[in-house]
Image (spheres, rainbow, N blue to C red):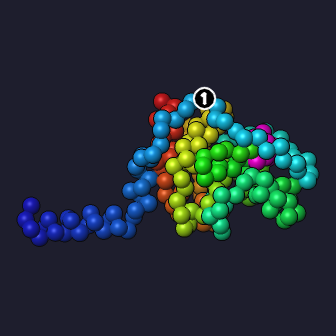
Amino acid sequence: MNRRKFLIYTFYIFSFFYLFPEIIASTKSFAGVRKINNKSPFIKETYLKFASPLVDRSETNMIIIHHIGGTDRDVSAAEVHQWHLDNGWAGIGYHYIIRKNGTIERGRPQNVIGAHCYHYNRTSIGINLVGDFEKSKPTEEQIQSALELTTFLCKTYNLSPTNKTILGHRDLSSTLCPGKNLYAQLGAFRQCIVDSLA
């Protein structure tokens, strides 16, 4: 390869890495993630009271990943529940909240219809990792817990971890959720689950 061709080749390689970092990120594994525990993850019960009756979900064909957005505080399921009550809703729309230290808190009961992604609530489970991932990144503890919870849910509902079953909110609605810094990791996220189920 002559010098001119080498320089052109190098330019294209560096341009790809610069212009498409989310593609590169989606193919990497998570450096801080331990082996996924195939047992049921620990869920912190919250015993939230809802303003109106909840309806059982008859089908589950996808898991939708969210962030809080608007604040990077370590908010609790109880706090999100109160926000949603204040909006005149039945209560928290997500089934699970994952705190910055990795604690998984119960939102809505797992078997009921959520209120987190319009048009898709009747067939999905909503998981919210707290934080604003347009500006910051999820913690390693959040990713670890999200992987273990999502793996458990895939096994529970016999879901294959693909981009049709594990999605970011933005895949289905006009929104930035779950934030660019979490969304860019969903490819690697799915692959970790594929590997754990193999």
User: Would you say the magenta stretch is mainly helix, strand or loop?
Assistant: loop
Work out which quarter of the rendered image holds the N terminus and state it: bottom left
Quick check: is 170 in the magenta stretch?
Answer: no
- 103, 56: nearer the viewer: 103
Q: Secondary structure at mark 1?
A: loop
Q: Vertical placement of 165 versus 137: above or below?
A: above
Residue at image location 92% in from the left, 51% down from the top = 52
- 157, 177: nearer the viewer: 177
How far from the left and from the top, in percent, is residue 19? Answer: 37, 68
Left or right of 193: which side holds 80? right
Tell me the residue that label 1 is attached to.
39
Q: Quadrant for residue 41, please give it.
A: top right
Left or right of 36: which side holds 95? right
Which stretch is magenta?
A: 107-113
- Residue type at numbered disc 1: Lys
Residue at image location 60% in from the left, 29% down from the top = 39
Left or right of 160: which side holds 115? right
Quick check: is 109 in the magenta stretch?
Answer: yes
Asked whether residue 40 appears in the rendered view, the answer is yes
How far from the left and from the top, in percent, is residue 75? Answer: 70, 58
Residue at image location 78% in from the left, 53% down from the top = 78
